[in-house]
Amino acid sequence: MRLTYRLTLSLISAVAAVSLAFAFFQTRADTLGLRRDLEEHAQVLAESLVRSAEPLVARHANRELQRLVDRFKDREQIAGVSVYDAEGKRLAITSGFTRRVGEDPALLPKSGGELTPSDRFVKLATGTIHMVTLPLREDDMVIGRLSLFHDATFISLQAAAMWKRAFTGVLIQTILIVAVTLLTLRWGVGRPLRRMADWLQDLRMGTAGKPPDMPDQREFEPLTREVAHLASSLTQARAAAANEARLRDIGESSWTAERLRVFVQSRLSGSRLFAVSNREPYEHTHRTDGVECSVPASGLVTAIEPVLRACDGTWIAQATGDADRDTVDEHDRVRVPPDNPQYSLRRVWLSEEEEQGFYFGFANEGLWPLCHIAHTRPLFRVEDWEYYQTVNRKFAEALLEEMKYEKNPVVLVQDYHFALLPRLIKEARPDARVAIFWHIPWPNAEAFGICPWQAELLDGLLGADLIGFHLQAHCNNFLDTVDRSLESRIEREHFAVNRNGSYTLVRPFPISVAGNFEEPPAPLELPHIERVRLLNQLGVRASFLGIGVDRVDYTKGIPERFRAIERFFEKYPAYRREFTFVQIGSPSRTHIRRYQELMDEVVKEAERINHRFQTSEWKPIVFLNRHHSHKEILEYYRTADFCLVTSLHDGMNLVAKEFVASRDDLHGVLILSRFAGASHELGDALAVNPYDTEQMADSIRQALEMGPEEGRMRMQRMRATVREHNVYRWAGKLIEELCDIRPAKIPAAPYLIPTVMSRSAS
Ligand code: G6P
């Protein structure tokens, strides 16, 4: 049965039942009212008749008595009066009473029993009679009885009329309510739903325009939201498929989110993907107006997020937001991204001491400067090392817990925070395939050798089936380091290490970004106008814009960059008041003294240089030292004349690739440090040595004066590289290599083997 019919039937039944119930009670109340009125009226009249009849009965004046009762002979409602003596013998009765009412014993007072007043309704074949009987007295002696009869048939007649009226009312009411409800549903719900259905149909056919406006009602909100997500996923999938088809046509095969998803599904044959990193992709923080969810500044997060989205995996990371606890479930998990959940984030909680020793201490004051040749001395404290081990074990436990029911899980461990994790995982789950990707450089063997725990770190790493670096040079350095410090067999022809029978492949996988190639943002109509507007917002008037985007880290060469800008204005004064450099500097690792000093230095350098050249309306450097969202950064990328990346040493540097990915207009020049891994792929950037101030100053000029054709050619080639070597390819290649490794024999499920705890105790 159609929904409308079912709805109509239900409505009719409900409305009719309620209205009938009301009518019933109303009619009943009215009938009872009429009966009560009649009783009261009869009582009063009977009492007055008694007062007239008593002396006549006492005197045996039967004629006068007859006259008295005959006074009621032609009344419409009063049927008659009868009078009896004390023995029950009738003395008088209204003439014609018997003819009108009939002789019914029910109308006779019961002998001896009616000395007290009585009042009742008697149902006869001719109708209903109300009868009230009162005693007649003389000097307190009962000398007889008087009965007064009313014709009560009118009450049932009136009740029937009332019922008839009520039924008509119920009918009209039901029709009206049902009609109004159905019309409201049709216009208020049916029409918007139909519009939505038509739009979805157009969407399916690929001819959809703007989604229809749905009524501004809360009930529609979840539907509108879900449909919007569905539409955007469909559009993306379509664009990806079209792109795939196009590439197939021209004989290429590019990696997309969709291709990665399909690839991972087929290669993992049902196994789940787990990623572990210290930095979480979404951080929840309390703000005055509620909880805010933000994406932290991290190249690693930029790279791994699209992979997890594509595969619906689980990401295990440290909880760092003060509202993180309020947003997870009882298993410390939360589905992310918040507005369109696609994978699970499992949070791990660290104590302050653990975070201090593991993250600020060992990872960032020890390993970070150790691996980056940026002239900051590494600090190795034994207590930091202990926390590093504790936290690695803590993450291993969380990971083992997450994958305890998963067969042959695939684990992608991220970065220098977790050098010990591969061994811990592999020992507990030999069936797992474990890769660790080292996002920062690996220095030469001598440099790494200053770490007091290099053997333990190397042993932990060699627990993995696969170790990935950005560059072949880093792989070579790693193999040299192992060769010099551990008992093992290096198979250089295969780039592998064989240690105690376990085999680890060492491979380069240059990481990248997703790029917006499938779904480019709307093109800017007039980029130069946008640029001026953006600068105006910052209180600066200028025609040229350079952009730098970094965490404020000593490896990024920010002071060196500022000095190059200073030199540029010295050498090319015509650009004063014409060109401004905006540096977005996200504060990073601010508990570490070296980072605090660097922030001071960067602020002071910007001030010093500004002070030298600035005017009332213009300054050479705008330093924005706060975290910016991807969307905010994108505005600068897309309007800048050039982007300046001057890392003193960098594993890859994804800012360079993001800038290229954002320039679908083919404008904008990339100036790139040759000490950043990205320079190996982006040969069309202007390569600079960040220690060479003169060269950087000249590169800035070259970027600003580059002919449009040359700029376009360079950008086109760089975009082709980034498009081809995107992050989906990175993940695809990493997972492909990992899945080619045959897993060890599978233990019986559940797979959690509690060796991690016993190891941690030792
Ligand atoms: C580099 C590291 C990442 C790290 C990121 C941000 O890209 O390789 O592991 O997440 O810097 O640093 P942070 O210490 O804030 O996580």
Image (cartoon, grey):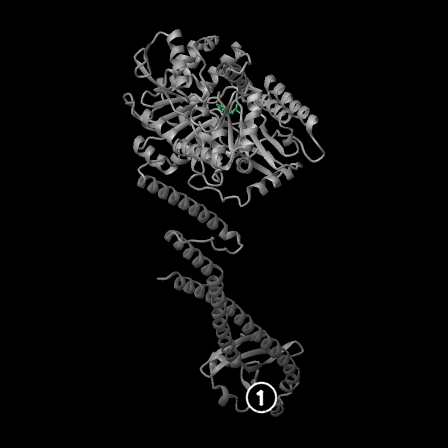
Secondary structure beneath label 1: loop
The residue carrying mark 1 is 75
Q: Give the amino acid at mark 1.
A: Arg
Residue 152: percent from left, percent from top? 53, 80
Whether residue 469 sits left or right of residue 704 in the image: it is: left
Residue 464: percent from left, percent from top? 36, 19
Q: Quadrant of residue 240?
A: top left
Question: Is 592 in front, or is 118?
Answer: 592
Around disc 1, counting alpha carbons within 10 Å, would you say few (fewer than 14), some (14 to 19), or many (20 or more)?
few
Residue placed furthest toward the right: 616
Residue 1: percent from left, percent from top? 35, 62
Q: Is residue 21 above or below residue 576?
A: below
**Which residue is painted at 39% across and 7% down in the image?**
484
In which quadrant will I find the C terminus? top left
**Which residue is painted at 30% across and 34% down in the image?**
266
Residue 537: percent from left, percent from top? 64, 39
Q: Quadrant of residue 491?
A: top left
Q: Is mark 1 within 8 Å of ligand 1?
A: no
Asked if residue 4 shows in the view, the reply is yes
Question: Is 599 in front, or is 430?
Answer: 599
Q: Is residue 29 above or below residue 309?
A: below
Q: Is residue 24 above or below residue 424?
A: below
